[in-house]
Amino acid sequence: MGERRALVIASQCEGLNLLSFLPNAARDVAEVLLDPSIGGCVPALPDTPLLVDPTAAELDSAVTSAFERASEDEATLFIALVGHGEYTFDDFYFLVKDTPLPPNSRTAFLLAQRIRELLGQHSLLDGLVLLLDTCHAGIAAQQAGDRWIQIVGQAGRRFEVLTASDDRAAANGCFSKQLVNIMRSGHAELGARLRCPDMKVALSGLCPSQTAVHLAFDGRREITAGDEGLWLARNTSDAWRSSQAADNPAADLIDTLTRDYVPPQQLQTLVGHLLMGTRTITVAGSDKSSLIAALARPSVARAVIPPQLMDAVVFVSATDTVERIATELARQLSKNVPGFADAARTFESSADEASWNLADAFERAVAGPLRDSQLKARIAVDGVDDLPTVSRDRLVHALLALENAQIVLAVGSPITAEAQIWVGAPIKPDVRPTGDPGGTKSWIPPNEEPDEVEAPPTDIGPISPPELMDLVRACGKAPVPTSVLIEASGLPVSAVRDFVLQQNNMRRLDAGTSRETVAITGSLPPGSTQAHSAIADTLIRLAPPTNRASGSPEQVYADAMAAVHLWHANRVIEVLQCLEQRGSKVPAENHAMWELWSSRIATAIGTHAKVAIIAQARYLTSKVKIGDAVTALSSFETLLPTAEKSLSADDPEIFSIRNNIGYLLFELDRPTESEAHLRMVIDQATRLLGPHHPETLHARHLHAVATGKLGDGTESARLSLELIPVAEAALGPDNEVTINSRLNYDFYTSESAYPPPDVFRQPTPTHRVRGRAEG
């Protein structure tokens, strides 16, 4: 997506009274627009953002060039005009130094008509904002606004105009001066970004001699609220920056929900419960989110909400996982609860390996530190109903079970709590499938019907890109980055943002930035198979798993939704690959993920399908990682006959299962059985897969470890020594089998007096469990 570009023009006509505030006022406008921390713009022209007293030809050339360059780069364009203007027969002219009066289109800039022409010619422009500070005579401000919509609106493009006019006697540049002041200092009553409609209200009070007018057009019709993406500046006020809301990932949503907020009686009730110590409070009804947002921004209800009442306020979205939610809660608690950060570190350092592996992300990051430290906290959470059912149930249970915490939970339907508050009209519940935790239906996105889980679709449709609405429907309530919609649809940035702005059932966050996301707020039919496939391909290009650490919006979305899109595109093998690549580092979270998906796949396509067998093997491997080796061994032994019956004899997956059985046998102190089992695996793998196949070499390594478990360290070392050069040649020196064979040899030849240190441990592939010397 393109940049924000600015061009400021200062011009006054010699035939009229001179404007003493020029060119300084225009220079200040340019400076604040180009400030990276405020306006975030770059110059629209290569040499300068400011043009002073140009000729009519120079002015037209500069504006034309700015349009051309912005359109080529799909950028947003800001043009500010400060100086003399004139209305003649309802036509507005921006005057240049030598314009004779009355003006015409050759001696002055016929603004509305020329902008209409340029908007029509440069269709890739990602929105236009015009700031007009002109003194003129001959037409009232609102009448001028109506003419603007009539003329410029014919171009069918997205634009906003913020203007303040005055008569020539009162001309003093108040509009530009006060606009700059507000943009520099911020506004205590506004949210994350300052927008044209906000400035209209503020300037009307600060410049009583001028009439402020704000116009906004979405490409089809005039809109009162304007375009969230065409913001003027970031709000730099101390009041906003120091608020809990400003530090919240959902700052834009909090701002939207609390704009022009009028505290209801239920807010007093809620605050009263918190101050009296009520431990669990649920909030339901159509205005529940606004109530939670007010808790994050006490300044909107100072008479009701004490400062710093809450320690953490989290707005959950459909792309969140329990792990991401726990991480955000821990971040806010570390900032707002003295001692929590130290408590979290103490909890981790004092936990033994077995209990740490068994703990899920919420226990690690939030529940454990609060419980052990006895610290108190107040937490509010909204949006849990947008999560898949199993994730929702996990989160709600974990929140309500927290010790030493007061919980405010916004939900669509009542749940058991010490206090329940209704605010607004009841919410019609989504049609959500039931089923046991881990069942396949719990992974159906909220906008999909339950019967879609029975089997993945089979027809990928035509090759041409799907329609934009189809793509949005495929994403459901999950906030999808605008960049994903642009790439998947093949449409320009401007076309996608025009479309989104024109819809009544979509919400944009971080609008007009590279982190912009879009989500459906109502109910729509599900997207097509083709749309799901297009989004999956886009995520592969924009969010490769190798770059997950970037934390970009595309990566966040891919972590949560890539597998879902692949599933609905009937690309089931790729689902497994995606889950492997995007698994959690927390064993308990991986276990929960594979439990969901293995059950879903088996239910949809049968337990004997190869994909279902692989998914079940991954699930059983995840059980080992949380310490349930006994159940895992029994289940692997049950799965093996199914795999042998359903797969070809030389399928590597059979040998992966056999290797896991061999490992678990010696881990459960059955080394004799393990050694015999692995010897058989080596013989069969060598014959059917070949002596250099990864599974064959893995079996040889595990056999060496099992031999050592039997007490024959010399033989174990010999087996590893034989394996090392073969593994290095076949798999490479950095492969886990090669590395762990070296470690096993070192251990049993007394070159190392202790088991291999943690620093040598490599991430475990989800298709197998490593041997003892592998950590």
Image (cartoon, rainbow, N blue to C red):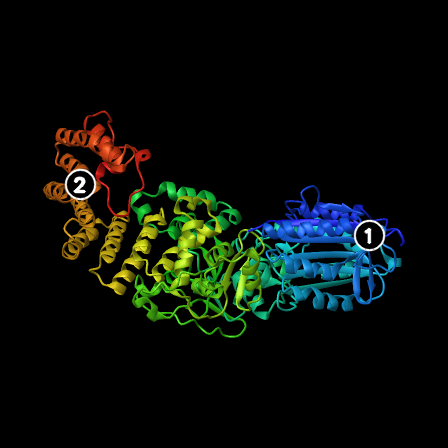
Disc 1 residue type (three-letter)? Val
Sequence-earlier tag: 1 or 2: 1
The quarter of the picture where residue 704 lies is: top left
Q: Quadrant of residue 476?
A: bottom left
Marks 1 and 2, Cα distance to the nearest angstrom? 83 Å
Q: Is residue 245 visible?
A: yes
22 to the left or right of 673: right
Estimate how packed mark 2 is, as few (under 14), some (14 to 19) or many (20 or more) residues with alpha carbons within 10 Å: many
Q: Position of residue 593 (x, y in %)?
A: 33, 55
Q: Which mark is residue 696?
A: 2
Q: Nearer the viewer, residue 46 or 584?
A: 46
Viewer-nearest residue: 670 or 619:
619
- Crowding near pointer 1: few (<14 within 10 Å), some, many (20+)? many
Does residue 64 lie above or below 166 as drawn?
A: above
Tell me, for residue 96, which label it has, or none: 1
Q: Which quadrant is the C terminus positioned in? A: top left
Amino acid type of the residue tagged 2 in the rendering: Thr
Seen from the viewer's position, the closer of residues 207 and 107 is 107
Residue placed at 31% from the left, 49% from the top? Answer: 358
Asked which secondary structure carries label 2, the reply is: helix
Whether residue 141 is situated above or below residue 362 in the rendered picture: below
Label 1's element?
Answer: loop
In contact (CB < 8 Å): disc 1 and disc 2: no
114 over 698 or under it: above or below: below
The residue drawn where x is 24% and y is 46% is 768
Q: Position of residue 568 (x, y in %)?
A: 36, 62
**Image quadrant assignment for residue 738:** top left
Residue 447 place in picture, x, y as percent: 42, 68
